């Protein structure tokens, strides 16, 4: 693990660390557990956007440890909570962070989500990190809906030096996706990243349009898209959960890109997402620049959230 990445995650998670690790530590340090303190643990978790269900289950687990006499000191409760949250977030081996590449090129990645969550920026981040591994990338500007959306992606394509396929404003986004898939095959690129327009998960016709985009890609490449990434905005807290459920029901979401994790105290939403849908968080956005992205790793995330303040400086 690169120390720079560790530092970036710790910095990005500072406010979430204050909410969860800091909140729990100030509650539990030097204390002996009692039923009232256990209730406060549950409330701290709920306030940190962990979700009511997960907060209840985690606290019930701790209550059980307390009743059986296995955990009595606040410090031991902290350690238990950390382990318990790690276990909740654990995914099967090999599923951890990052894009899963198809056995033959191109790997097609469809990027979806509600308006303004960070889809286009996340496409740029993924493009940059894939380029760093020496693979070739093609962008598809399938957001033909919002004025300026194509230009925004085009600016990224120029800055990152990757090619782009675009349609006229107002063009059928499925047609753009179809052309881009054909171009990716013809040019032999490694990865095709398809940026789509923001849509509310409650807008049925727009959700159907996503299915259409997916289906035209499949006409050319039957096992594509190999990844359908749902971008969620970490700052939207519990609303992100409703989005996750609706998008997962409409298209086969294979992974979450959790954007804007920097500067929010609501990073506990990672735990709520895990409860809501059986889809891994694959990548996290930690800022507005293309390099502000990290693969998600549950252990690293929980360590950062439970780290003692100032520990980031100490490891440097
Ligand atoms: N702090 C922070 N800002 C981000 C992150 N990702 C995206 N943003 C900002 O969020 C805003 C919206 O980003 P876009 O990428 O345009 O979002 P979008 O989902 O493509 O928006 P629409 O296409 O309009 O639906 C921009 O100002 C981005 O710079 C992130 O990880 N951290
Ligand atoms: Mg966009």
Image: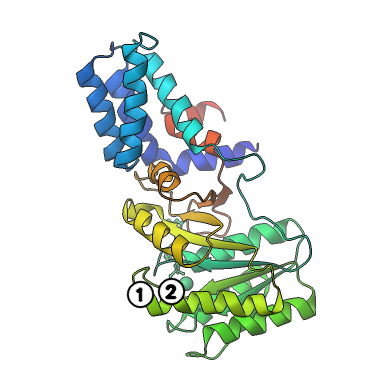
Q: Quadrant of residue 160?
A: bottom right
Residue 136: percent from left, percent from top = 74, 67
Q: Is residue 172 left or right of residue 22?
A: right
Helix, strand or loop for disc 2: helix
Residue 271: percent from left, percent from top = 42, 41
Ligand 1 closer than 8 Å to the CB at disc 1? no
Residue at 49% of width from left, 49% of height from top? 278
Within-10-Å neighbours for mark 2: few <14, some 14–19, many 20+: some
Q: Which residue is mark 1?
A: 203
Q: Which residue is mark 2?
A: 207
Residue lying furthest left in this view? 36
Residue 110: percent from left, percent from top = 58, 68
Along the line of sight, the residue nearer the viewer: 123 or 205: 205
Q: Is residue 147 left or right of residue 156?
A: left
Residue at 23% of width from left, 26% of height from top? 39
Ligand 1 is found in which quarter of the picture?
bottom left
Q: Is residue 74 visible?
A: no
Residue at 53% of width from left, 79% of height from top? 212
Q: Quadrant of residue 249?
A: bottom left
Q: Quadrant of the N terminus?
A: top right
Above or below, 118 against 48 in this view is: below
Q: Are marks 2 and 1 in contact (CB under 8 Å)?
A: yes
In whole angstroms, how far apart are the C-alphas of marks 2 and 1? 6 Å
Q: Is residue 298 left or right of residue 267?
A: right
Ligand 1 closer than 8 Å to the CB at disc 2? no
Residue lying furthest top in this view? 69
Q: Quadrant of the C terminus?
A: top right
Along the line of sight, the residue nearer the viewer: 22 or 214: 214
Within-10-Å neighbours for mark 1: few <14, some 14–19, many 20+: few
Helix, strand or loop for disc 1: loop
Q: How many marks?
A: 2
């Amino acid at each position: 693990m690169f120390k720079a990445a560790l530092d970036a995650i710790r910095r990005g998670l500072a406010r979430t660390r204050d909410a969860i690790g800091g909140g729990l530590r100030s509650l539990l340090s030097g204390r002996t557990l009692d039923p009232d303190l256990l209730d406060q643990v549950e409330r701290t978790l709920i306030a940190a956007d962990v979700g009511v269900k997960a907060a209840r289950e985690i606290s019930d687990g701790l209550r059980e440890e307390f009743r059986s006499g296995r955990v009595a000191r606040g410090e031991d409760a902290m350690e238990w909570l950390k382990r318990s949250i790690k276990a909740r977030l654990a995914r099967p081996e090999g599923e951890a962070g990052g894009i899963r590449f198809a056995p033959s090129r191109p790997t097609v990645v469809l990027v979806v989500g509600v308006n303004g969550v960070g889809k286009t920026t996340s496409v740029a981040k993924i493009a940059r990190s894939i380029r760093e591994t020496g693979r070739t990338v093609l962008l598809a500007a399938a957001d033909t809906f919002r004025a300026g959306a194509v230009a925004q992606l085009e600016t990224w394509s120029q800055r990152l030096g990757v090619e782009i396929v675009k349609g006229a404003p107002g063009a059928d986004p499925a047609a753009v996706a179809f052309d881009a898939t054909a171009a990716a095959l013809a040019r032999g690129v490694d990865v095709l990243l398809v940026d789509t327009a923001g849509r509310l998960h409650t807008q049925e016709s727009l959700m159907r349009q996503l299915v259409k985009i997916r289906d035209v890609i499949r006409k050319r490449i039957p096992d594509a898209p190999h990844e359908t990434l749902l971008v969620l905005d970490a700052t939207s807290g519990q609303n992100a959960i409703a989005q996750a459920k609706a998008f997962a029901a409409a298209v086969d979401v294979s992974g979450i890109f959790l954007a804007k994790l920097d500067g929010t105290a609501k990073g506990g939403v990672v735990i709520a997402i895990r409860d809501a849908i059986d889809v891994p968080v694959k990548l996290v956005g930690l800022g507005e620049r293309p390099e502000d992205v990290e693969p998600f790793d549950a252990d690293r995330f929980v360590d950062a959230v439970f780290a003692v303040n100032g520990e980031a400086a100490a490891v440097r």
